[in-house]
Amino acid sequence: MSRKTGKLPMGSKCGLSLRDDPIARKSVDAARRQRIDAPFAISSPGAIVRANHSGHRRWRPVAAIFAITVGLFGIVQVLALPFVGLTEGFQTMMMSMSWDMAMQNRVTADLAYPFNAEFYYVSRYGMVTLLALLQPWLAAYPALGISMVMLTSLVLYVVATLVFAGHVFGTQRRWRTAAVVLAPVVAASAYSLNDSLPSGALVAAALALWTTPRRRTAMDLAGGAVTGLLLGLAISLRFDAAFILPGMAALAWWRDGVRPAVIRIALMGLVALLAASVVYGTGGLTILDPPLIGRVAIGLWSEPISLAHPLKVAAVSLSLPAWIALVIGLWIIARHDRRLAATVAIAIAGYLLPYATSLYQPRYLLPALPFLIGPIAVGLAGAFTSDTATGNMSRILCTSTLAFFLPVVGGQSEGPRAVIGNVWNAIDWTIWLARLRHDNAAAAQAIAAAGNDGQPIVSTGWSEERLVHLALVDAGFRPLPLDGTGRCRLAKQRYRRGGQVVDHIRLDVPFTGASTQRVHAVLVAPCWQTWGILSARTPSVVTFVTASLDRPTGVLGWLTQGSGVNWRPLVVTLPTDEIAARVATMPLPPPHRDRLDAVTARPPLLAPRPLLLGAPRFLPGF
């Protein structure tokens, strides 16, 4: 062989063609099969990290400490899973609408503000349909049914994410598993009923199947069709699953090149479009309806979200060690495979750009999270198994896990969230969810008892108003058409069960962000006498469901100020977003309008809109 050219001399024995040399032909065929069977792992970052592994023992004690800490964090995250339940109003709204769908009833979830029900019907149609199909089971075992839906989704999401990260990034299973554990948003998304985790699980399964190596073109096309089916079902559960399409297209381009990728992408996209359209079509909707009604709802929302909010969401989605490992992993990937680095960038940017500042909750990130789990796993492997400069980061990573045991710093987002203090935060989740499950049941019993006695019920917030509706419907009461005229008809919903009638007065108007005081001043205060619920001489007994009733200085404080009313014992606790709700039964005197009128006003409240759920599709613009 020539040193200059690297070529074999003509006529030499080693220069025989593959046709004449069966041994050489077999070796080339074996290499070709390997290339087909594992197209990603041949030059994957994980394989490069393993190739650079020097076997030095100096990192082993640090890695052992890191493994123990991460394992402990994983265990405390699992502790909350037996207490999966309902934590927010949109979850009880989905449950109410699924009951109407299962019973083939007209949608009665919110007769005063039909757009509220219409928004959840359209934007959560797939999840509402799934819950309706499970309604016989949910009716008999509601807590168990909700838990099984979320836990099954969690298992599918984790397994599919591990498979996908292995296909694309080539890291060992232990590093992929550690990466998932270090992303608390994964486990926390299963703590309550939502549509993000089931949809994200189907997206993760589609990604795992999309990157599975196949030897034959027919199998490749069949896999693309099944991938499209999974993605279409994910889009029908939650439309933001469609935002992952740029990432899937980039994966196909990275593996196959431009021309072969076009066929796979076209087939997958067509099947996904058909699958989602069929599901939406069963409800008289089109695939364009969810983003259209979402745009209308965001336009109605009177509380603008700052540009810093998505950063806060990201901060509580991954732990501090995960962020450090992510930086290391992205550096390794960018250094060894720029096309893969570009693929990750396209996937993340393509998913986040449509959200802009409407990335309200950490669980919204689930469909795109597998593209981050892989780099995190690469970063962990590089830090603990490489003898390069990156290996020195193992001590920093190990030290960063001490943040798990610091005092909690975080906030509220559908429950307690933490930037540091993650171990204590996971324990807080467990205690809160256990209390919440018990107290939701007790609150529902108190609401049903008030309905049995014909006592008016007043709810002071979104989650409380939805709980009252679900509890009354579960007790056999059915909402009646709105009666009365003017604004008073918007604040009171009457329910009937046989000869029993109960009135539900709501101090919440959806999509406005109007304060409880303002809603009372505009809608409720002028109507007490009209309804005949209260009289100046004989106070009525009213059951309050509120999230701010810690002391008389709360909502009942300003509502009953100067009345001389004696507080009766609280009968049940009802944790909601603020983890401080109460249900109380007490005499309520006529409101003091002069005090309530002095409360600063919010923008005008929403007017009732026509119920469009029975139409073939909703009409955008309203």
Image (spheres, rainbow, N blue to C red):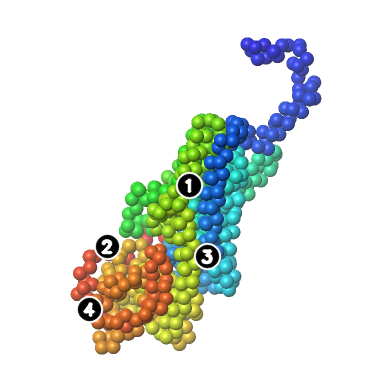
- Which residue corresponds to mark 1? 401
Crowding at mark 4 (Cα within 10 Å: few <14, some 14-19, many 20+): few
Return the mark for residue 83.
3
The residue positioned 34% from the left and 71% from the top of the image is 550
Q: Is residue 152 above or below residue 525?
A: above
Counting residues from the N terminus, which is met first, the one under dot 2 or under dot 4?
A: 4
Q: Amino acid at mark 2?
A: Pro
Instruction: Say which element carries label 1.
Output: helix
Measure the C-alpha gap from mark 2 to mark 3: 39 Å
Counting residues from the N terminus, which is met first, the one under dot 1 or under dot 2?
A: 1
- Horizontal placement of 12 versus 435: left or right? right
Q: Amino acid at mark 3?
A: Phe
Q: Is residue 477 above or below residue 47?
A: below
Return the mark for residue 562.
4
- Horizontal placement of 173 versus 418: left or right? right
Q: Quadrant of residue 417?
A: bottom left
Given residues 238 and 161, the one toward you in this image is 161
Q: Is residue 164 visible?
A: no
Instruction: Say which element carries label 2.
Output: loop
**Can you give x and y, in whole percent of width and height, for residue 216 in the image?**
70, 39
**Can you give x and y, in whole percent of width and height, for residue 508 in the image?**
34, 69
Measure the C-alpha gap from mark 1 to mark 2: 46 Å
Q: Amino acid at mark 1?
A: Thr
- Which residue corresponds to mark 2? 603
Return the mark for residue 79.
none
Measure the C-alpha gap from mark 1 to mark 3: 26 Å
